Image (cartoon, coloured by chain):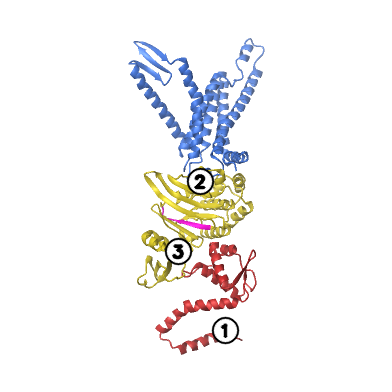
Amino acid sequence: MNDTFNLQRFGFLFKKTIMERPLQLLGIMALSLIATLTIFSISVYLNHWKDAHVLSFAWGYVGGGIILSSVIFSYFNTNAGGAAYLTLPASSFEKWFCGVLISGVLFTVVFLLFFRLMDTMAIAIYHNNLDKTTADYKHLYNSANIFPFDDRQVQFDYYVFLNFAGASLLGSLYFNKANFIKTAMVIIALFAFMMGVNWLIARMFFSNVNSAFPYLSVGLQIGNEYRNINVSPEAEKRFTACLKYVVPVILWLTAYIRLREKEI
Amino acid sequence: MIRFDNLSFGYSRNKLLYRNLNLTIKNGSIYGLLGKNGAGKSTLLKNMAGTLFPVDGNITINGMQPQKRKPSFLSGIYYIPEDVYVPALTVRKYKNLFAPFYPQFNSDSFYQYLKELEVNVDSKLNRLSFGQQKKFVIAFALACNTPVLLMDEPTNGLDIPSKSQFRKLIASVMNDDRIILISTHQVRDLENMIDNIIIVDNGDILLHEPVGNITGKLCFKTVSEIPAGANVLYQERSLHGSAIVIENTKGEDSKLNLEHLFNGIVENPSLSKKIFETA
Amino acid sequence: MEFREQQAIYLQIAEYVCEQILLKQWPLNAKVLSIRDLAVMMEVNPNTVQRAYDFLQQREIIVNKRGVGYFVAEGAIAKVIALRREQFIEHELPVFFRNVYLLKMPLEEIQARYNQFIDDNFKEK
């Protein structure tokens, strides 16, 4: 028996994971799609195409993703549930991979397909309803375009998703009860700590610090003028690369290690 | 076979619940793990099931280490915790989703066991009463035909007819290759089922003997007067006289009274050690 | 089946089997219940039934045919009676004698009462 990965066993696990709590998993997916649609519709109704795209994408994708990844391993609310999950005959890798596949990959694919479908239909309806005879027809027509998935804003959302969904996934393996709230508090505490320490360090170098953002910039007050000191572009690049790739990889992989070592 | 080699366990290194346990559990027997509440019976079972890890030492079950939680290990063991977990599924759906993980699962026996335990198969599992859920999990576990079966207080929550059915089922699934280990403090429920007894207290194994050896070394009886010079492990006043557990020096055959044995061993560990150490 | 307090379970199971043989529920040369079935019926560990069957086999009350199961032995009834008599002499007679002695009952009276009892209960009609 292959104790790391077996395709048939993984198939059983995947099916079991989805069907065991269809309301929870598919329900959260459905809810985030509905939320996306609602935000999108309201913004379109108010004639803000840019908002419609950016807001609905960010809330639906990032919000839904965070909630979904906080429940994907939520077997540990009860002792018995946790024991049943840990003793289910599948490898830790398969269990982790199944969770990542559903909350990371599957959710992203479903969301993107839904978003593109919704976007295309809304724009088609909008274009059809325009009066071709008016003077600004062309301008109005061009004001609504399909939202490209490689937009800068979307890329930003991907990274936010990778970081926060990863943290949420990991948090659910550390906290057995109320994992979502506890994880959020840890993130806020961590962030506050970084800001605070950063501020103290900035104060060691400058006596007139007005604001300080970790790793990136320090705002100084000189008389009545405010000036920002930014890190060099290379350093900034390294910092963003860290947030884009290194931190997510650490979060999602630590979840695997944590699952393997999980005791209940 | 289950082996503990110098197993130490606790929630921290400084506060160990068990220290340097050595134990061998052989196939073909029903083991009763007895201990007071909080004596660490559940902890011991969890270490065997691989949901808790030892601080020191080693456990091997049929040559494999539980804490690695390999599929080949997990498909050969079924652990029923005291409180059971069931999802919001029907019996059939549950079977379809969970049984494929157990290669020896037998669907016919599964439905047979459910029938014998009178579990309602039409309703969703989460709607069943606690006792019904427990019986459902027991039926599923038995149908998995795993070589090792660990049960934590299985008769808790079962009504009297169900307890009887439970005993019948255990008797029917027992064979020479299986290990069934049952932890309980309701000793009377399983008195005649158990053929090996492990008594734990204060992080130590006070007794680990086959029932045959116990009735060879000890005599359980009710007397009007305690015989002079007898090594009395336990005595209790009753209507008919005194129920006693004494060292069996005359080769008498008596019926094991698990409750009296347990009380005697826990109250008087040094005497019991002395009695059982002499070959 | 209700087990009594005093006697080892395996002996009580053996006694149950003897009873079935004496009552002709289990005729001579017939197959007796398998270890598993009897264990299920009595809600005991199969190893305990095994021990009872070993005991009965040793007493030549049942025989094991390999791969087929256990059967009531030829001449089992005589063996059962012999076993019962042995157990009676060992366990029940001392208690009886003790009472006879304590209550100062003359043996003649016992004899007379015994005859009366047989007349009342077991007399051939």
Which type of secondary structure does the marked residue at label 3 adopt?
Answer: helix
* Residue named by callout 3: B214
Q: Chain C is drawn in which colour?
A: red
Q: Say which element carries label 2.
A: loop
Query: What is the total number of numbered labels drawn onto the structure image?
Result: 3
Real-space CA distance between mark 3 and mark 1, rounded to the nearest whole angstrom: 43 Å
Element under label 1? Answer: helix
Does residue C50 appear in this view? yes
Q: Position of residue C88 (x, y in %)?
A: 50, 78
Q: Give the range drawn in magenta.
A: B29-37
Q: What residue type is labelled 3?
A: Ile
Q: Position of residue B14 (x, y in %)?
A: 36, 44
Chain ID, mark 2: B
Upstream in sequence: badge 2 or badge 3: 2
Please determine if labels 2 and 1 lie on a single subunit. no
Looking at the colours in the rendered structure, which chain would you say is drawn in blue? A
Q: Which residue is drawn at 66% across and 19% down?
A: A128
Q: Position of residue A10 (x, y in %)?
A: 60, 39
